[in-house]
Image (spheres, rainbow, N blue to C red):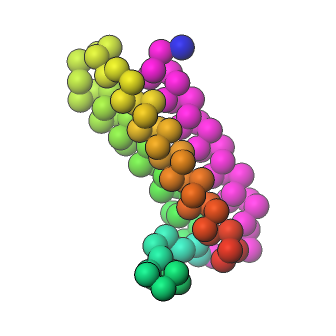
Amino acid sequence: MTPIAAAWTIVVVMCVWSLYLFFAWHGADSLPMQWGLSGKPTWFATRGVALAFFPCLAIFLLLLITFGKRHGSAGNEPVFVSLLLLVIQAAWTFFVRRYV
């Protein structure tokens, strides 16, 4: 599997995860997006926007990496970026679960 294909597979996993959470957290109108030093959320986003944030960011960055360089010269950066965003999405999910 090429690095680009692996990165897009991770993005699909992120999208499916967000779609699952959208229906699992149906009772929440808004979700926290940022926390202050006290550990309390400082601002919220609507459920749809909050759950679409990480997959959309991953898609944007992968398109930027893939088309910003010559075809085939992206190396392993797409996989690293998509894995990093998947880990960040997992951490965000862990923290948000306390407020849902």
| Residue 75: percent from left, percent from top | 34, 20
Answer yes or no: is residue 59 visible: no
Left or right: 37 with respect to 99? left
| Residue 31: percent from left, percent from top | 58, 72
Left or right: 7 with respect to 99? left
Above or below 69: residue 64: below
**79 or 64: nearer the eye?**
79
| Residue 66: percent from left, percent from top | 32, 27
Left or right: 79 with respect to 61? right
Magenta segment: does it hold 4?
yes
Which residue sits at x=64%, y=62%?
94
**75 or 67: nearer the eye?**
75
Magenta segment: does it hold 91?
no
Looking at the rendered image, the quarter that the C terminus falls into is bottom right
Answer yes or no: is residue 18 visible: yes
Above or below 58: residue 63: above
Which residue sits at x=53%, y=84%?
40
Which residue sits at x=68%, y=74%?
98
Above or below 29: residue 5: above
Q: What secondary structure is the magenta-colored segment mainly?
A: helix
> Which span of residues is magenta-colored?
2-29
